[in-house]
Image: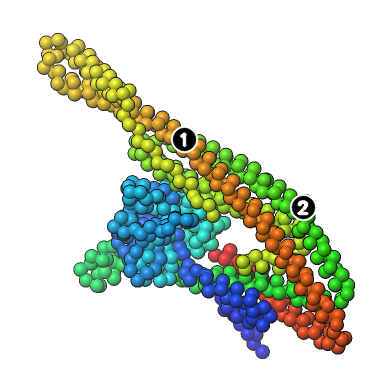
Amino acid sequence: MTQAKPLPLPKQVAQAREQLLALLRDNAPESAKWVEQIRANRRKQPSVVVVGETNRGKSSLVNAMLDAPGLSPVDADVATATYLVFGHAEQWQARACYPGQLAPVPVGLDRLVNWVSAAHELPDGELPPRYVEVDGPAPLLEKLVVVDTPGVGGLDSVHGELAVEAAATATALLFVVDASAPFTAGELNFLAGVGDRVETVVFALSKVDVYRGWRQVLEANQALLAEHAPRFTGAAFHPVSSRMYEMAGKAPNPEAADMLRDRSGVPELLAALESLLVGRSVMLSEANTLRALSTALGELKVGLENEKRALTTGEAEAEALRARKDELTTERRSSARGWQVKLRSEVQRARLENTHEVSREMRDLQSWFRQAIDAADRDQLKHLPAHVDAAMQMVSGRISERVGARLNQVADTVLSELFSADELAVIRSQFARSGQPQVVVRGAERRMPTAEDKLLVFMGGMSGIGAGKLAVVPLVGAVAAPILLVPTIIIGLGAGWWIARTRKHTADKQHMKTWLNESIADSRSTLDQLVTEQLIDAESQLSLALDEALGKRIAGIEEQLREVDKALRLDVTERQKRTTVVTKRLAEVTAGAERAERLLANIRTVRDKK
């Protein structure tokens, strides 16, 4: 007899989901509703984040993918931690977003560049947004959310971490390199670092219509990946030409347009993204449903085990429950409350650790940017505040995330000391069913000309005139000097201008260092205050949550005691009958929880192989 072929993993997941949901509906209807709500609220579309070094054609490629020329500002200067999130809508619309208390601000598409580029002024009275959402009727956006990161700035710099943060939450990363030369060290370092965080990376080799040697560059890139980022060995590259795709819109006839689009490589890239992400993202989204099912089934399993013990052990179970209830009641009422002391101690430890981290982060940031100021030319110096702003927002977000992670560890530490493993399963399930603003660095004030600057210009001019005379007189004599006075003055003024300009650039650098020191100090003070406020608030919330957990656990024990009393009043035959039913339900729930965990492990295996 031929053995049945196993179902593909997505079908296994879908089948298990329905069967486990049915099991929950029969045994715990409220838990089933919670799982169904999680499934209903899941993100419908996968997301792809487009990253790469500056001037690699990222935004031009995004415009081609969306078939919307000029939509995403091309070659914009480094933005202050602002990126573009493209979603689907019936008509084009945009809004600047501020996570937290501020409401989104409508943005006209013709002013989009003002919101995402440091080279353009923000509208009067507006703050730099964290990101800008742009929705429109592009066919791709019906299936994928596209995130464009024009403000990365340099993947080997501190700004590269912005791309890492954006990529960490994406279904996939679209890494754009151009055909002018193989990978840079910064790009390889970025890929090596992001490999453990991002599940799927798709490579696009842009500008292949401009560089005839792009095939040799592609081969060199594949060799460099094998050596420096082996996770991506053998990865497919998609040669693309955004310019050729844009030319298709101006083609004289449909046949020529179709030919240009095909040769651009963009349709092939879109097909690859859809095949990789659309189907897979559904399965990955199902993982969240499976995780919720596993949590709910774990809680149900503990309840059934308690019920079985009540039916089989009788008075011994009642005595154990009474003792546990007294123990937890005493712990809750005690003025000393050991768990509160432990909680306060752990929060203090978290505060010290975060203080040290803030100091280290700010010290490293200050050192890095002081070196950048020393090496900056005039244009780089002008845009440096935008770089500082981007880095500061990235650091503040990272610190806030670490605070949250530490607080979770604090809660786990205190919970594990208060409750047993079975009790924790119930409590975590109960809580499962039940961020700080970013630091914005003030802009650098424009350094106004001082009396010293004007004196430098005058002295430089006079010195230049004198130098010009000294150069001319020995050659032509005193008689010819008046004839050459005008060109001599011009030469002198030029030398004076150069001296003044050099001195001014040096003064500007010093002014920028002063501003940097003040901004770092202000930002550190703000960040320290935010962390302190977050910890104070968290300590209060955790204390209330743990007290509530104790109250719920005591109430749960009282309910179990009532069930034990009912069981003690049953005759032997009825008790055996109910024990058989509970044992069967317990076996089904245990098997269901194990099945959910196995499928989650399989999903992780498939993910890690990609």
Q: Look at the numbered disc 1 and give the secondary structure of its residue.
A: helix
Crowding around mark 2 (Cα neighbors within 10 Å: few <14, some 14 to 19, many 20+) is few
**Side (left or right) of 221 relative to 350:** left
Query: Farthest residue in the top direction?
Result: 478
Residue at 35% x, 33% y: name it. 447
Left/right placement of residue 520 relative to residue 213 reads right
Q: Nearer the viewer, residue 51 or 141?
A: 141
Residue 347 percent coordinates (x, y): 67, 49
Label count reads 2
Of badges 1 and 2, the one in the foreground is 2
Q: Position of residue 531 (x, y in %)?
A: 57, 47
The N terminus lies in quadrant? bottom right
User: Which mark, residue 335?
Assistant: 2
In this orientation, does residue 262 appear?
no
Q: Can the viewer see residue 567 in this picture?
A: yes
What amino acid is found at the position of numbered circle 1 in the picture?
Glu
Q: Residue at x 69, y 59 (%)?
A: 546
> Which residue corresponds to the image point at 81% horizontal and 73% vertical from the top-left?
561
First along the sequence among labels 1 and 2: 2
Left or right of 6, for residue 88:
left
The residue drawn where x is 29% and y is 71% is: 258
Q: Nearer the viewer, residue 44 or 450?
A: 450
Q: Are marks 1 and 2 in contact (CB under 8 Å)?
A: no
Disc 2 marks a residue whose amino acid type is Ser
Viewer-proximal residue among 397 and 79: 397
Left or right position of 446 against 495:
right
In the rendered image, residue 7, in percent from the top left (x then y), is placed at: 59, 80
Find residue 321 and report its image quarter.
bottom right
Where is mark 1, residue-wise?
Answer: 518
